[in-house]
Image (cartoon, rainbow, N blue to C red):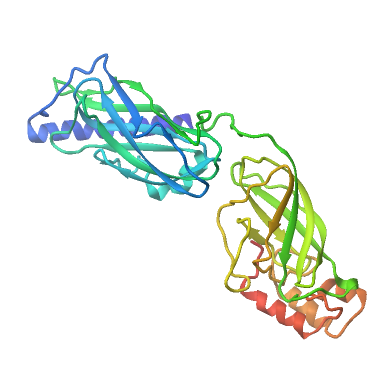
Amino acid sequence: MKKEVLKIGLIFIVTVATVVFGLYSLYGGGASQSTKASGETMALSFNTETVTAAIDTDFTTTLKVKPSVNAVLRGYKVKVNFDKTKIKFKTIVYKLGVVSAGLGDTNAKMTAINERGYIEIIGEDDTATGKAVTATDGAVIATITFTALSTTGNTISTPGSQFFSITENKSLFAGWAMTPGNLSVNGGGPTMTPGGPTVTGGQTGAAKLKLKLKFQGIAGKPADAFNKLSVKVKLLNEATEAVTDYKSADFVADAAGIWTGEVSFNVNPSSRYVVYAKGQFHIQKKICDEKPVETAAGTYRCDKGKITLNTGNNNLDFSGIILLAGDLPIQDGSVTAYDTSLVRNNLGKTDADAVSKADVNRDGKVDTQDYSLIIAALSVRNDE
């Protein structure tokens, strides 16, 4: 990682230097403003010192630089660190010159930025005169939009920066002393050092998940002898990307065909989670919302986990979506010819072995209704 950073830095300096001297050779002149720069400072700041944001709301901040003396800027590199467990990057707009192509982070790198927890803002001014920045007004570097993932306090920081300016003798200067700027979000918190120790912001503890699920083809309460489904559940922590082992539990249905059951996990209340649920005859479902809904059975899809789990009881109503049937015992994560054949070969049977393997709708027999449910699942096929 260090070698990569050094490589990028060297490429950036060479690029800026080439642009600077090329432009000065071409135009044969200097900028209207100049500075001796030696011993002077560049101060970074945000347009506000604090911001408050509710979960899932966006907030936009402006990053600004102000030199202690007037300067003519040619390029810059600013690292913006953020706590990826509390907020996520959404967009950036460069305001000072343009992004250095292939070097500076852009909106196209959103996924990578959020995975590592920092933005590398690398830009340049490739005009003949450079960008004149006064000690009085400074200049806006970029506007950045984040999305809050938590109401827990955290801090956006700018620990590593470098600015390139033109001196009175038209040489490239990069020796500015930097004063970093911070932005407190929801009360502030520790600054992050991506790649170093993770700041969790909370203690782990045992959480009991009381789940409500709805399964395809079961509209009511089955007879007592068949009113049981084995369900596997696991969690994904969005912050750490850690996935738990499966926990299994027997679920039972009420008159409305809503199945309830409980599983327990060790969780971090400061994190957000994805819940994966897989029924005894079903395709695994990825669930990111605490109360998911869908307009048509089986169409719910999601990306990032938004579920907060606390120590103690957590009531999660997932009955607004349908878990599709299709992956029969012995399950392999897909709906295949094995599954359709298993139902077809047991049509009309009511013995315990056949019912335990292929009675998808829990009516005590294997019939064409079960076969139709499996066929309908072929459009999805695989676990999420």
* Image quadrant where residue 250 sits: bottom right
Q: Is residue 376 above or below residue 101?
A: below
**From this viewpoint, which residue is outermost toward the top?**
39
Which image quarter is the C terminus in? bottom right
* Image quadrant where residue 212 sits: bottom right
Measured from the top left, where is residue 73 in percent x and y? 22, 30
- Please name whichever residue, 374 or 207, is drawn nearer the observer in this view of the structure: 207
Measured from the top left, where is residue 315 in percent x and y? 71, 54
- Please name whichever residue, 14 or 111, is drawn nearer the observer in this view of the structure: 111
Q: Is residue 197 left or right of residue 364?
A: left
* Image quadrant where residue 178 sits: top left
- Please name whichever residue, 49 or 354, is drawn nearer the observer in this view of the structure: 49
Measured from the top left, where is residue 362 in percent x and y? 82, 75
Q: Is residue 216 above or below residue 383?
A: below
The residue at 15%/23% (across/down) is: 34
Q: Is residue 18 left or right of residue 78?
A: left
Q: Is residue 308 above or below residue 358?
A: above
